[in-house]
Image (spheres, rainbow, N blue to C red):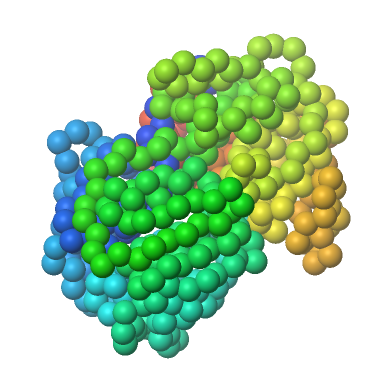
Amino acid sequence: MTDDVLIVHGGTPLEGEIRVRGAKNLVPKAMVAALLGHEPSRLRNVPDIRDVKVVRGLLQLHGVTVRAGEEEGELVLDPTYVESANVADIDAHAGSSRIPILFCGPLLHRLGHAFIPGLGGCDIGGRPVDFHFDVLRQFGAVIEKHPQGTVLNAPQRLRGCKIELPYPSVGATEQVLLTAVLAEGVTELRNAAIEPEIVDLICVLQKMGAIISMGTDRTILITGVDRLGGYNHRAIPDRLEAASWACAALATQGDIYVRGARQLEMMTFLNTFRKVGGAFSVDDEGIRFWHPGGELKAIALETDVHPGFQTDWQQPLVVALTQASGLSIVHETVYESRLGFTSALNQMGAHIQLYRECLGGTPCRFGQRNFLHSAVVSGPSKLQGAELVIPDLRGGFSYLIAALAAQGTSQVHGIDLINRGYENFMDKLRALGAQIELPAA
């Protein structure tokens, strides 16, 4: 498909201004939360990305009315007439997103049953959905697996329980929150994820009438209520997209003002960006990122759950590190297969070696399990244009950054995957002066 290929002529610094809207890791989940209410909800700052379209379609299949609001990027979601959806219709969405797994709790509360199709998403390592089902069983759900998907039933009202996560998983924390708010009694969740998007989801649920308290030790207490209303909420900006554009500015020796970016959720990234040699300035409307000239500096970096350095920041930054002087060490501790994208960078002229050992300061859960989860990046290296096939969302945008930083022309295949999380990314690239084009039909 020619419309899934982008031709990139590299070597031009990206300069100008773009805007980021609501976080991909919050907006679809806030849309699912609307299912729990008995009144319409209003969600603002919604990006035009594919994950939003997938959830919108699934909500509409279940009888939720979804329409555009008065302002740009606003959705009004009315769950008054929630109903069972046709299995074949739901199955049509299978493989397009992992979001459907989060429909379980809300549908069990509203209908007493749910059907979840096979799930898709980026192939960056294990994301076992069985853990979601184990959690739902603890609440009292009865689960049957079938070839076409999973059927869940709640013979009686779901009950609160005590849950301790083996790892502070974002998806598992979301599952517990969306299920516990209407469950009978108190739910105690230990070792929870505390990402900004999780906190924003808790704000959404509290606006609906939920009772949720966060402890200082990754413990969240949820007291179930009998009924939830709607919400009026403006989604926090997408800190992951903002960081991607920051890395693009650094790798191409450019200067990008990211309107909508906020300092608070990006503090860990901003510290690392400065250590590498990037410059930034913060104002009330956004953050300007630029390459101040001179050499970039090699660093040692470990990804971690929030408040650590986010795994979604790692791939774009690795591209910038190929232009830093010296040896950079990157230890990926969140997804075991997230460094696979570096082989294409090596084909472009980068020098990146992968290792099975934990090259960071602390051993991690992948250390003795034969995963190539540490990288040594030797730079600076001159990147050359190449034929690239996008492996996943963040890796895909990282390939775009590499192609833009490289000399010569690259053909990037599979760009439709980037639409999952980057709103109007081609228009934004053009606005920054990128030399890109679609192949002739």
The C terminus lies in quadrant: top left
Q: In the picture provided, is 321 more to the left or to the right than 397?
A: right
User: Compared to 299, does 357 lie above or below?
Assistant: below
Label total for image: 0
**Residue 43 location (% of width, % of height):** 26, 44
Q: Position of residue 440 (x, y in %)?
A: 40, 39
Report if residue 9 is visible in the image.
Answer: no
Q: Is residue 308 visible?
A: yes
Q: Residue at x 52, y 71 (%)?
A: 162
Figure check: 155 above or below 432: below
Residue shown at 41%/27% (left/top)? 260
Report the front residue among 338 and 166: 166
For the point 40% across and 19% down, the residue is 285
Near-viewer residue (64 or 403): 64
Residue 237: image quadrant is top left
Q: Nearer the viewer, residue 228 or 27?
A: 228
Q: Residue at x 46, y 16 (%)?
A: 283
Who is closer to the viewer here, 111 or 87?
111
In the image, residue 179 lies at what x, y percent?
39, 67
Q: Is residue 254 left or right of residue 241?
A: right
Quadrant housing residue 163: bottom right
